Amino acid sequence: MLNFEFLVPTKLIFGRDAQHQVGELVKKYRGTKVLLHYGGGSIKKSGLYDQVTNSLKKAGIAFVELSGVVPNPRLKLVYEGIDLCRKEGVDFILAVGGGSAIDSAKAIGVGVCTDTDIWDFYEKGLPVARTLPVATILTIPAAGSETSKSSVITNEEKNMKYGLDVEEIRPVFSIMNPELFFTLPLNQIANGVADMMSHIMERYFTNTLSTDLTDGLCEATLKTIIKNAPILIRDPKNYDAWAQIGHCGSMAHTDILGLGRAQEWSCHPMEHELSAIYDIAHGAGLAILTPAWMEYVYNENLPMFVQFAVNVMGVDGSFREPEAIAREGIRRLRDFFTGIGLPETLKDVGIGTDKLEYMARKSTGAEYGREKPLGAIKPLYWKDVLEVYKSAAFRD
């Protein structure tokens, strides 16, 4: 086990009607003027908008609004938010939505507090000295951004999608009421499941030994998702299933599941190229790439993939045939994804083969003359990434 430090300062408020507390919670954090940041009209149709704004008014909290967040949140809207916050004297940001709204809010919070172009923090990994406090009301459990120190933004002009990963941007509090998830379309449920599972698997697959506790935590969380996701596909208003899925999504990205181990993080940067260029759903891209990545690297640490197959995917078989067990585990994962309605290949989401090499070179930095391999199980250079993309392109 490796050395680690662990602190998650986000206060998580969970349960029915929890959103009605938001005004008093903001007041406790000394917010006086809030940027209410959200996507389209869904929070107004559902009544959540009125609930949130009434709670803020009741607590005497002034607010301004910035809507228009879309999946793969855009840098242009972040710039608009920074300008609006400065003009209006905003001192607190409340994101109402899923990971895209939260990631956009985090970027705005950092941008308000610096004279440096916010994109430089994402592209160059600059350190963050200060940010406006950000809080969330979650409407889509998937990205785990409500408890994480991560934010991912798309620069639409450069076709780049980069992440910022610093402790300063963790939300100060997040509200999770599973009832707010009841109206999600089935494709968003499935995409969210793939995203949170990937957050776990990026931490789970490791060459680090003596990590029994974090192994077990990862496995239990994955099995909880695998058990409850099909329930939601059949019954999207099942409170208990949503409660467990929502809890898993938050825990998946707090870092508790990655303590003491070298983490993988190869599928996420590979997928960021897909969604940056083709604007596909992040979870859909991960569902396509993860099994393809597994097939490319499993022999680099066969015992790890056998453990996954047995402990997570429930594979039986002779341990004298470990490769067969590992491959069956990968097959079952792919079948799980397609069983809840996720795509199997790049062809299924309309992505051809003409830009695979370009994306592979971009993902490792080779396109810019600063190649850095992805991952830990097997370091992936751009030619390795290209092979994963080719494997994911279509299946016979």
Image (cartoon, grey):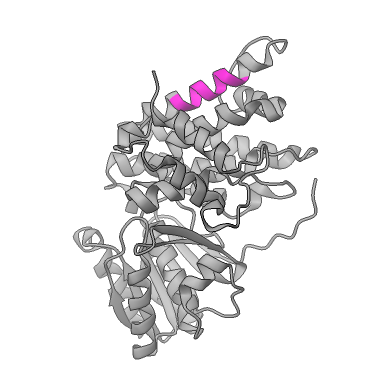
Direction from residue 380 to residue 64 in the image, left or right: left
Residue drawn where x is 27% and y is 43% of the image: 185
- The residue sitting at 44% across, 80% down in the picture is 92
Q: Is residue 247 above or below residue 145?
A: above
- Residue 345 shown left or right of residue 53 in the figure: right
Identify the residue at horizontal 35%, vertical 86% (top origin).
Answer: 60
Q: In this orientation, which residue lies closer to the viewer: 249 or 164? A: 164
* 260 relative position to 234: left or right: right
- Closest to the observer: 14 or 192? 192
Q: Is residue 329 magenta?
A: yes
Q: Is residue 351 visible?
A: yes
Residue 181 lies, with reference to residue 301, above or below; the image says below
Along the line of sight, the residue nearer the viewer: 66 or 28: 66
Q: Position of residue 94 (x, y in %)?
A: 40, 72
Task: Please provide the residue range marked out in magenta.
Answer: 326-334
The image shows residue 390 at horizontal and vertical percentages of: 45, 31
Residue 80 is drawn in which quadrant? bottom left
**Is the C terminus in the top left, top right, bottom left or bottom right quadrant?**
top left
Q: Which quarter of the rendering shows the N terminus? A: top right
Dominant SS of magenta comes to helix
Give the x, y percent position of residue 348.
Answer: 31, 32
Within the magenta stretch, is there residue 227?
no
| Residue 239 location, quadrant | top left
Measuring from the top left, give residue 108's x and y in whole percent: 43, 75
Q: Residue at x 63, y 11 (%)?
A: 317
* Count of number-bearing discs: 0
Compared with 235, 179 (above or below) is below
Looking at the picture, does residue 100 appear above or below residue 339? below
Residue 24 visible in this rendered orientation of the protein: no
